[in-house]
Image (cartoon, helix red, strand yellow):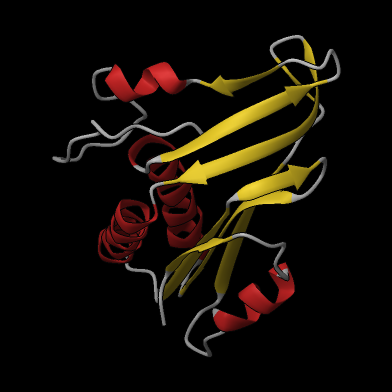
Amino acid sequence: MSTFRLESAAFDADALRNELKDHGCGGYVCFEGWVRDHNEGRQVTRLEYEAFAPLALSEGEKIIAEARVRFGVQRALCVHRTGALDLSEIAVWVGVAAPHRDEAFRACRYIIDEIKHRLPIWKKEYYASGDSGWVNCERCAQTPHAHGHDHDHDHAVGAALD
């Protein structure tokens, strides 16, 4: 089973949660990133995501594997949408099952933070004014980020999932 997926259509979060069920786990944590109606003072009407799939899938799998080792979680899964999304749709879903809640919370946070910074996934916003624009594409050229954990990997590919 792949632990990181790109999906072009809406998915069932309950079905994803069921993929993580494990009798050895007492803690389950999920993060859902939804399309919101505003960003930086502008009214957003919809989003579009594009990804460089071969690299995104490979790096996404690495992130999940890192989280499993680092936090001792039994199961973890992340699904990110591509294509057009309407308001309130799930853009990204992360689920983690672990023996205890602390590991599950920490692993879930690690996964979403790393996905946002390491994957070649780009977001385009469409505004009520009729304009549109790619969000945070300048991150691709920025130096590595700081987000509260130590690691030895490079963030040069950058990503914009905010």
Q: Which residue appears at 55% of the width and 76% of the height? A: 26
Q: Could you tell me which quadrant the C terminus lies in?
A: top right
Evaluate whether residue 106 shows in this view: yes
Image coords of residue 88 (percent x, y): 82, 44
Evaluate whether residue 162 shows in this view: no
Image coords of residue 143 (percent x, y): 24, 18
Image coords of residue 7 (percent x, y): 58, 62
Query: Could you tell whether 154 is left or right of 88 in the image?
Result: left
- Looking at the rendering, which quadrant does residue 1 occupy? bottom left
Of residues 28 and 92, the one nearer the viewer is 92
Most distant residue in the right direction: 128
Of residues 70 and 82, the one nearer the viewer is 82
Most distant residue in the front direction: 130
Q: In the displayed structure, would residue 9 be above or below residue 45?
A: below
- Looking at the rendering, which quadrant does residue 113 occupy? top left
Q: Which residue appears at 50% of the width and 80% of the height? A: 25
